[in-house]
Each structure stands twice: as C-alpha cells, then as structure tokens.
Amino acid sequence: MLAGVAAAALASAGLVAAGPAGTAGAAGSTGPAARTAAVPKHALTGYWQNFNNGATVQKLKDVDDAYDIIAVAFADATGQPGAVTFNLDPAVGYGSAADFTADIKAKQAAGKSVVLSVGGEKGAVAVNDDASARNFADSINGLMDEYGFNGVDIDLENGLNSTYMTQALKAVHAKHPDVVVTMAPQTIDMLSPQNEYFKTALAIKDFLTVVNTQFYNSGSMNGCDGKVYAQGSVDFLTALACTQLAGGLDPSQVGLGVPASPSAAGGGYVAPSVVNAALDCLTTGNNCGSFKPSRTYPGLRGAMTWSTNWDASNGGAFASQVGGHVHGLP
C-alpha cells in the first residue's frame, strides 16, 4: 500500500503485497494521488457510502482508522456498455472533487487503500463482450488516474460473466500492476468453483487481493461439509468460508463480509463477538461452533462490513472490536 517503499520495509512493517501472501506488488504509478501498493497481512475492509440512506453521513476523512481498505460505493454506469464513471453525491458534503481526492491522499498517507466499488444492489453495469470489457477497463484505469484510487471492487449483484470480467480486470492490472482488486459476491455466488464469480476470482488469483463474500441476506446455505447452516451464526461464516478455501483461493484472499448493524441489512447480522469467533475458528481452530474446519488458515485476510457509515451509526463497534481482533490475528 505504500508506493515507493522497499519490500524489506513493507515486510518489517507487517505488510504484504496486494496479491496472495508471498507475492510481490509493483509500487508507484501515475495519477494525482500517491497510491499505495500493499495491504496488511490481516485487513479490515469497509464500504463508504457516497449517498445518504439514513446512516451517519461521512467524508472519507471521517472513516475510522481501523479500516485498511475503503471501498467507495459506488461507481455509476454510463451510456456506454461496460463503462463506469464516478459522481460525488452532494449529500456527502464535499465542496469539490479536489477535496475528495485530498481525502484519498490523506488516507493513503496513513497506509490505507481506497478502491472504487462497481455495482451494489441497484448497480446496472454489464461486462459481457469484448467491447464492454474494454470499456470497463478503460474507464476504471481512467478513474484510477483521475482520482488516485488504488483499485476496484467488484460488487455486481445482478450477474457476472467470468470470461469478460476476467479480461477486463487483467487489462486494469496490465495498466496498473499495483492495483488492489477486491470482490464482494453474494453468498450464493461462491458456493462452487464453477460459479461465475468464483471462476473470476480463480482466474485472477495471481493479483486478486481479497474476496469479501456477503455472508448475509442469504437465508440458509450448504457449507463445505454438505450440511445446511443458517445465516447469522458462527457456523455459517466458517462453513461457507471453508468452501472458498477448499476451492482454490489463497487464505489471504478470503474475508468475512457482514453488516455493521442490524439496520445495515435485511438479515444475517451478527455481533462483533461472533465475527471474532469465526476468525479464531478459521485461523487457530478455537471458538468454533458445531462446524470445525479440517485445518486452520492463519493467513486469512480478515473481515469486511457494510458499511463504515452504519458502523458509525452503531457507535463504531465493528471498527473497534472486529478491527482490533483482525489486526491481532497470527
């Protein structure tokens, strides 16, 4: 995450490259902001709302320091298939785009990554042929240069074509080798390596940062042991994450996505203590529920929440309790 910093310095600071553990990330690139090229070994991700939906309204500078990756929600579709743009919502309170980019720089100076999220519940971006893949990549590359974003988050909840999304993300990586790529699929999208989201994640495994699956708004699902688990439990988090770990993702590419408060989602909220128990179960084999993985994954990346705004509305419990736990993982 720290552009221009030597790999040895990153290692001594407990930081690793944006890809799987042990891989090297390129530092430095063009753009108005000093982007960073590494994320912590164990990272907390939070979505920042570029709109007001009743949660605490924040500017980027207000986001709790516990968040290592901040996903700006959301990019907007344009009239060109696959292409996206970004428009600051006046409700957030920025006087200018320059003030926003200054906040991005400040977060990066503090060792954070700021990525642009594409999609969301109402997102209407489709990347399903060569032209739209090219348009997507060109627009993301342009927005990274314009605003200084570290990379892109894929949160497409209305379908994804692995062939063309992979093509688009590889084109982004070719232009920005230090790109931070995160994904936030719905639970059902990561139940099998044959699913389009899962296939995309595996296809870009050499530079994928983390998949923070939304383990909420899901109902009950089959875990990696074939048993059915209900959302809102430690078993749901561990048994569903196990599917991704067994399916080929590096532990450093797996994160647990949960709501920051009961108001942040329709279902699946769990207390910070449950998230922490699931993290312990997966990394050390302790604090498991009825499901216990056959092995431990000490390199697990961490956790994600929707959203930093709902967390602020909830007294910052996720940042303080889960953030502190994530950063203390082995």
Image (spheres, rainbow, N blue to C red):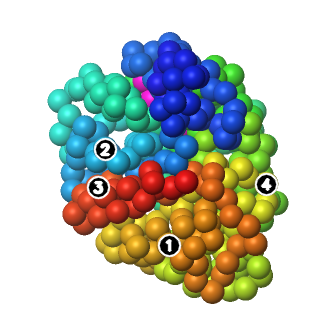
User: Up-down: is 173 above or below 87?
Assistant: above
Q: In front: 325, or 174?
A: 325
Q: Which element is circle 2 on?
A: loop
Disc 2 versus disc 3: distance between alpha carbons?
A: 13 Å
Cα separation between marks 3 and 4: 33 Å
- Tag 2 near tag 1, CB within 8 Å: no
Q: Marks 2 and 1, Cα distance to the nearest angstrom?
A: 22 Å
Residue 214 position within the rendered picture, expressed as x and y whole percent measured from the top left: 54, 64
Q: Which residue type carries mark 4?
A: Gly
Query: Which span of residues is magenta-colored?
Result: 148-152
Q: Name the residue under label 4.
A: 248
Give the secondary structure at mark 1.
helix
Most foreground residue, 68 or 137:
68
Amino acid under disc 3: Asn
User: Helix, strand or loop at disc 4?
Assistant: loop
Q: Can residue 29 be seen here?
A: yes
How many numbered circles does the render carry? 4
Q: Name the residue under label 1.
A: 277
Q: Tell me the mark number nearer the camera, choosing from 2 and 1.
A: 1
Residue at (77% x, 79% y) in the render: 225
Q: Is mark 3 on a helix, strand or loop?
A: helix
Q: In which quarter of the image is the C terminus?
A: bottom right
User: x and y percent of residue 143 in the render?
Assistant: 47, 26
Q: Residue 65 carries which label?
A: 2
For marks 2 and 4, the one nearer the N-term is 2
Q: Residue at x 49, y 80 (%)?
A: 232
